[in-house]
Image (cartoon, coloured by chain):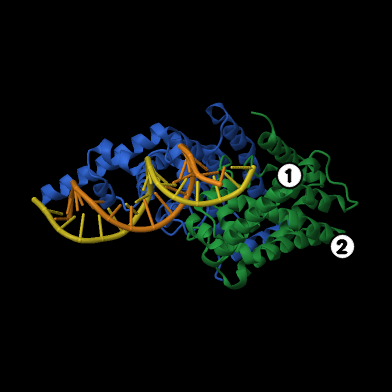
Chain colours: A blue, B green, C orange, D yellow
DNA sequence: GTCTATATGGAGATAGAC
DNA sequence: GTCTATCTCCATATAGAC
């Protein structure tokens, strides 16, 4: 049965890698399940046996990517960056570089804002991936000795994650050569984000911070 | 030929209203083009003759909605609100109320972040609608005698429009009873938005504002 | 458990009737 | 120009072979 399981694992891997190659070459929409099956030399049904839908292939890619990214991100966080801004910059650019070859595939993921859609970054299906990803921002924040306001601090990782998702979304659809608009966006927005976090500690900002925390509680709190 | 044109116009209207009714009843995804054609008593091809795709029906709905909304929004803006916050609140709630019966249909619009997809609020196809909509925020800003910083002012309508789109997106997928979470989100976020705009006039905020304007220039500027 | 052959039903395209 | 009948291709489902 080891044999069987192993053979199965190989078939699964073959189908996934074939699919990813085709997605890369022709894009997600253009590639059909029939093509994937034919190219991998299995019947169409076999493809569905391993991946219950075309979307499931993308989800598998997403999960695999996150697993491969984890050590890369850990390594990035282990480096001695001079401040939060530098760490965030390193985290985000590492991800963009990693996803570069499959940029068009990511659009299949980014295309869905509907939290009910399994491919949405906000869906239940991608919850585990999302929570791990948010964790990396927690670490980026914790690497500083600086104290963030107690009321705001618990929300910051999720806020930074949303910021990152915005950047990635922009990048996915960025048609400029080498996606240079995205990098300009990153260079311009990152200082604002970190500056705002710094400002939030000022007594003058107390009222605005209070409003912001209330807003975040409303978003993440119960109905 | 008046007859012909008129008959045609009637068929078109019939197909559109039939489609919208079905979308309302069963949702966008569940409704098939075949059903629409059958219910409207025309051949499938006729439906495609008037609307080149299922998405085109939604776009037609969007355009029609915007046309119907325009006088409503003008009326709202004509009322004497006490400040920007009140005007924005009125604008946004008016839209939400108007779209209430077709909330699920809006998800077909909101589902696409891809600016290349015609149903995206950022697409070329919806540019005219978008620009008119941004105009209403321009008017909401102009109704005040207050001067906004000259560097930031030109960007404010588009920024407020994005804020509105965020609220609408949240509303579309809000599963809480009566979408009360969205209204809480609106009550909590609107003061922050207007407060930030006020703060932006402070000399202390000059550096941050400068960064923000640079960011906006990068977003809306050329490649 | 793994996989094949075949079926279903839908979006969209098209040739041509009127 | 308006519309019908029909076709193609696709995602997905399923019965059952091995």
- Could you tell me which quadrant the C terminus of chain B lies in? top right
Let me know if marks 1 and 2 both belong to one chain: yes
Upstream in sequence: badge 1 or badge 2: 2
- Confirm whether residue A184 shows in the render: yes
Asked whether B43 or B166 is in front, the reply is B43
Mark 2 residue crowding within 10 angstroms, few (<14) / some (14–19) / many (20+): few
- At mark 2, the secondary structure is loop
B134 w.r.t. A188: above or below: below
Residue lying at the far bottom of the rendered structure? B177
Question: Percent position (x, y) of residue C8?
Answer: 33, 58
Q: To which chain does the residue with label 2 belong?
A: B
Mark 1 residue crowding within 10 angstroms, few (<14) / some (14–19) / many (20+): few
Which label was assigned to residue B102? none
**Residue at horizontal 73%, vertical 44%?**
B131
Question: Percent position (x, y) of residue A2?
Answer: 12, 50
CA separation, marks 1 and 2? 22 Å
Q: In which quarter of the image is residue A220?
A: bottom right
Question: Percent position (x, y) of residue B172?
Answer: 59, 60
**Residue at horizontal 27%, vertical 50%?**
A50
Q: To which chain does the residue with label 1 belong?
A: B
Which label was assigned to residue B79? 2
**Residue at horizontal 61%, vertical 67%?**
B181
- Could you tell me which quadrant the N terminus of chain B lies in? top right
- At mark 1, the secondary structure is helix
**Residue at horizontal 52%, vertical 38%?**
A172
B150 w.r.t. A217: above or below: above
Asked whether B107 or A73 is in front, the reply is B107
Question: Percent position (x, y) of residue B116?
Answer: 57, 39
Residue carrying label 1: B131
Cβ–Cβ under 8 Å for marks 1 and 2: no
């Amino acid at each position: 049965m080891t044999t069987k399981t192993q053979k199965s694992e190989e078939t699964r891997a073959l189908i996934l890698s074939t699919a990813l190659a085709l997605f890369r070459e022709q894009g997600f929409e253009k590639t059909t399940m029939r093509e994937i099956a034919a190219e991998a030399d299995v019947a169409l049904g076999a493809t569905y046996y391993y991946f219950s839908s075309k979307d499931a292939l993308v989800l598998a890619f997403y999960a695999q990517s996150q697993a491969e990214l984890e050590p890369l991100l850990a390594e990035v966080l282990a480096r001695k960056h001079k401040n939060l801004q530098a760490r965030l910059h390193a985290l985000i650019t590492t991800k963009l570089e990693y996803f570069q070859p499959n940029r068009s595939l990511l659009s299949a993921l980014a295309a869905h804002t509907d939290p009910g859609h399994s491919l949405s970054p906000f869906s239940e299906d991608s919850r585990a991936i999302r929570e791990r990803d948010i964790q990396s921002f927690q670490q980026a924040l914790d690497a500083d000795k600086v104290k963030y306001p107690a009321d705001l601090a618990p929300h910051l990782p999720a806020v930074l994650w949303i910021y990152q998702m915005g950047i990635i979304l922009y990048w996915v659809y960025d048609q400029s050569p080498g996606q240079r608009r995205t990098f300009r966006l990153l260079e311009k927005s990152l200082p604002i984000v970190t500056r705002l976090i710094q400002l939030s500690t000022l007594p003058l900002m107390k009222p605005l911070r209070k409003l912001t925390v209330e807003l975040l509680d409303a978003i993440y709190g119960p109905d």
